[in-house]
Image: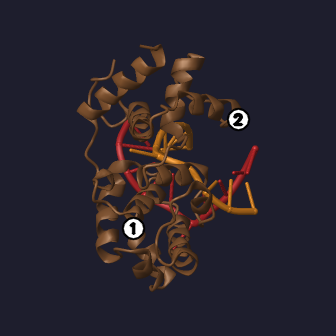
Chain colours: A brown, B red, C orange
DNA sequence: ATCCAGTCGG
DNA sequence: CCGACAGGAT
């Protein structure tokens, strides 16, 4: 077996055994739920997002529910997640989804990128995790893994270069299903040890 | 490069 | 007081 394929299998096995079961990873979670989680997770740790995400989806189960509210309600519901501008953008995204996509979260990278508050990371993450697409997902956790594997440094460089994106694309498994789990697995690996869950990763 | 209606633990 | 935190927009 080629070395890269062996790495894919090994990390997939590790992820299957140790992944946290987060609500937005449940098979029944809607694309809207995934989008909300990704916006909330921009610069905010998982543990702080969890309770707010639960309340948010209970109150606004679809983009149309949120779009019907005043934007100020979104900021209030945002609580203490930080950078409340994201709440306004999420509300604006809900409005755009209703107006331009008939109320359904779009499934392609390019369409997602058009939404307010959705950049290259979030567009790729939603396309992959909510729609099962093969996307090159690169966030700060994944960049930590790149740094350790290919630069020999603990922390990633300040800016994300085209070369690093190319590297991430080359590492991505060809199989679609595996590529989706790979993105989640590398992300989880890059964050491992930051959650105080012990040192099961060596 | 810098700011974002930022927040939290060290 | 400092920096990390599933970034994005200017």
Q: Position of residue A54 (x, y in %)?
A: 29, 64
Q: Quadrant of residue B1?
A: top right
Secondary structure at numbered mark 1: loop
Residue A162 numbered mark, or none: 2
> Tag 2's secondary structure?
helix
In the image shown, does A110 or B6 lie closer to the viewer? Answer: A110
* x, y percent for residue A30: 35, 63
**Res. A175 mark:** none
The crowding category of the residue bearing disc 2, from other C-alpha atoms within 10 Å (few below 14, some 14 to 19, many at least 20), is few
Task: Name the residue located 35 percent from the left edge and 54 percent from the top edge.
Answer: A48
Q: Is residue B5 left or right of residue A19?
A: right
Name the residue: 61% across, 50% down.
Answer: A120
Q: Is residue A136 left or right of residue A36?
A: right
Check contact, mark 1 vs mark 2: CB within 8 A.
Answer: no
The C terminus of chain A is located in which quarter? top left
In front of the other: A166 or A196: A166
Q: Residues within 10 Å of mark 1 (few under 14, many from 20)?
A: few
Tell me residue A127's x, y (percent).
Answer: 49, 53
Residue A77 figure quarter = bottom left
Q: Which one is in front, A25 or A70? A: A25
Query: Along the polypeptide, which appears first: circle 1 or circle 2?
Result: 1
Residue at (27, 34) in percent of width and height: A16
The chain letter for the residue carrying disc 1 is: A
**Front position among marks 1 and 2:** 2
Q: Which mark is residue A79?
A: 1
The chain identifier of the residue carrying mark 2 reads A
Quadrant of image for the N terminus of chain A:
top left
Q: Position of residue A81 (x, y in %)?
A: 42, 60
* Cα–Cα span, label 1 and label 2: 36 Å
Are the residues under marks 1 and 2 on the same chain? yes
């Amino acid at each position: 077996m080629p070395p890269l394929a062996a790495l894919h299998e090994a990390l997939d096995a590790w992820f299957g055994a140790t992944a946290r079961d987060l609500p937005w990873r449940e098979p029944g979670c809607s694309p809207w739920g995934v989008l909300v989680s990704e916006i909330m997770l921009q610069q905010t740790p998982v543990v702080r997002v969890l309770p707010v995400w639960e309340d948010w989806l209970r109150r606004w189960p679809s983009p149309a529910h949120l779009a019907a509210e005043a934007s100020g309600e979104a900021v209030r519901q945002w609580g203490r997640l930080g950078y409340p501008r994201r709440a306004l953008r999420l509300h604006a995204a809900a409005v755009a989804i209703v107006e331009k996509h008939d109320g359904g979260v779009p499934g392609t990278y390019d369409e997602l990128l058009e939404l307010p508050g959705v950049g290259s990371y979030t567009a790729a993450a939603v396309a992959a995790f909510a729609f099962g697409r093969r996307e090159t997902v690169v966030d700060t956790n994944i960049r930590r893994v790149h740094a350790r594997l290919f630069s020999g440094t603990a922390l990633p460089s300040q800016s994300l270069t085209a070369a690093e994106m190319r590297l991430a694309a080359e590492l991505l498994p060809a199989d679609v299903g595996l590529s989706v789990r790979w993105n989640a697995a590398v992300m989880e690996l890059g964050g491992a040890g930051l959650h105080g869950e012990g040192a099961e990763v060596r």
